[in-house]
Amino acid sequence: MAGPRGEYKKSAMRREQILDAAFTIFSKGGYTGSSVNEIARAVGMTQTGLLHHFAGGKVALLRAILERRDARAETILAEQHGREFLAGLVEISRTQETQRGAVQLYTILAAEATDPDHPAHDYFTERFTRITDAVAAAIEEVGATGGLADGVDPRRAAIELVATLEGLELLWLNGLDINMAEDMRRRINSILTTPL
């Protein structure tokens, strides 16, 4: 019984090594400028060996990297509602400041994926819709308790908050003196009657 578990553990560790290598390579060359062979070489494998772990090839690697990044954010927001959810957005911004490579890769992929033929196009379209819907729902919950400033439209405010977060990350990557968490907190506070 211990044998398969040990093999499974080694396989899971190998998958993580492959994802780490893919993350590094995609961060440097983007998705379109990188190859499965390059990733395989980085972890001392053949391309066939890598495809044993990621049968979908480069697209499967891309999706796994994006899902791993989103899982970290979703952990912060799990079971949060209203003001707590909005405070979670500030916390996500704070964690982003310690993950420059992840932010850079995400930004590159988001730009590449504006092309409808890019393999991550649907992923990003769905992701932005899902995030905007979740933020709008949190803002609506705050509004239901009288916590929104006059004239705030939850849907429009959600779009603006998501755009603010995306824009702050891009400016930060380009060297502007930005404190993403505090800038995000200020933007959220502008729609609330009581600041976070």
Image (cartoon, rainbow, N blue to C red):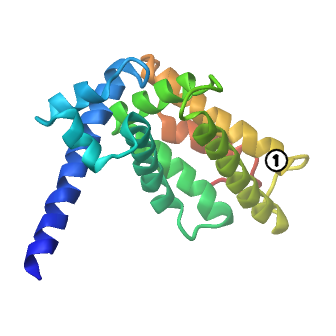
> Residue at point 53% right, 66% down?
78
Quadrant in which the N terminus appears: bottom left
Badge 1, how many Cα within 10 Å: few under 14, some, many 20+?
some
Q: Quadrant of residue 117?
A: top right
> Residue at point 61% right, 45% down?
127
Question: Is residue 50 shown left or right of residue 149?
Answer: left
> Residue at point 32% right, 24% down?
35
Question: Is residue 166 shown left or right of residue 177?
Answer: right
Q: Quadrant of residue 18?
A: top left
Q: Nearer the viewer, residue 52 or 126?
A: 52
Question: Is residue 167 shown left or right of residue 192?
Answer: left
Vertical arrangement, residue 143 with respect to residue 57, above or below:
below
Image location (x, y in percent) of residue 123:
58, 41
Q: Secondary structure at mark 1?
A: helix
Question: Is residue 57 shown left or right of residue 168?
Answer: left
Q: Amino acid at mark 1?
A: Arg
Residue pointed to by mark 1: 155
Image location (x, y in percent) of residue 105:
41, 30
Label total for image: 1
Quadrant in which the C terminus appears: bottom right
Image location (x, y in percent) of residue 169:
50, 30
- Residue extending farthest to the right is 151
> Residue at point 42% right, 25% down?
31
Q: Nearer the viewer, residue 137 or 129?
A: 129
Image location (x, y in percent) of residue 130:
67, 51
Q: Quadrant of residue 111?
A: top right
Vertical arrangement, residue 70 with respect to residue 141, above or below:
above
Vertical arrangement, residue 114 with respect to residue 121, above or below:
above
- Residue extending farthest to the front is 48
